[in-house]
């Protein structure tokens, strides 16, 4: 599946992204900023260490998409619906 950010993310790639994202330091940096290119450049560099080749834009897009999906699943659950779910909900729930 090709999306705006290039090739489709594999489960391992997403897990690695979430692992980096769950770093308290990264979270603090992301919290107070809109201009976050520099942070996502760090994230991309750390993914590179896992042998994952993603640029900062792909990381930011994936981060935004995961966050958006998480929020919509979370609000569906809060309103009592169990029909919505997502693959990495529990991991994201621990972070967000």
Image (cartoon, rainbow, N blue to C red):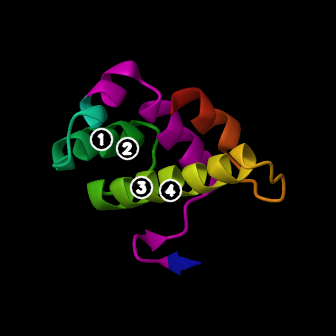
Question: Contact, CB < 8 Å: mark 3 with mark 1?
Answer: no
Q: Which residue is mark 1?
A: 45
For the residues marked 3 and 4, what is the alpha-carbon distance in whole angstroms? Answer: 6 Å
Marks 4 and 1, the one that precedes in the sequence: 1
Describe residue 60's horizontal placement relative to residue 19 as left or right: left
Question: Contact, CB < 8 Å: mark 2 with mark 4?
Answer: no
Q: Position of residue 45 (x, y in %)?
A: 30, 41
Q: Which residue is mark 4?
A: 68
Q: Position of residue 93 (x, y in %)?
A: 61, 34
Question: Contact, CB < 8 Å: mark 4 with mark 1?
Answer: no
Question: Residue at left 31%, top 21%?
Answer: 25
Q: Which residue is mark 2?
A: 48
**Image: magenta residue range:** 3-28
Question: Residue at left 30%, top 33%?
Answer: 31
Question: Residue at left 49%, top 50%?
Answer: 67
Q: Secondary structure at mark 3?
A: helix
Residue 6 location, quadrant: bottom left
């Amino acid at each position: 599946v090709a999306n705006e950010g290039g090739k489709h993310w594999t489960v391992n790639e997403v897990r690695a992204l979430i692992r980096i994202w769950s770093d308290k330091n990264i979270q603090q940096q992301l919290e107070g900023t809109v201009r976050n290119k520099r942070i996502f450049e760090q994230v991309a560099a750390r993914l590179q260490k896992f042998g994952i080749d993603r640029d900062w834009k792909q990381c930011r897009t994936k981060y935004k998409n995961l966050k958006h999906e998480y929020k919509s699943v979370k609000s569906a659950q809060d309103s009592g619906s169990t029909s919505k779910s997502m693959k990495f909900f529990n991991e994201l729930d621990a972070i967000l």
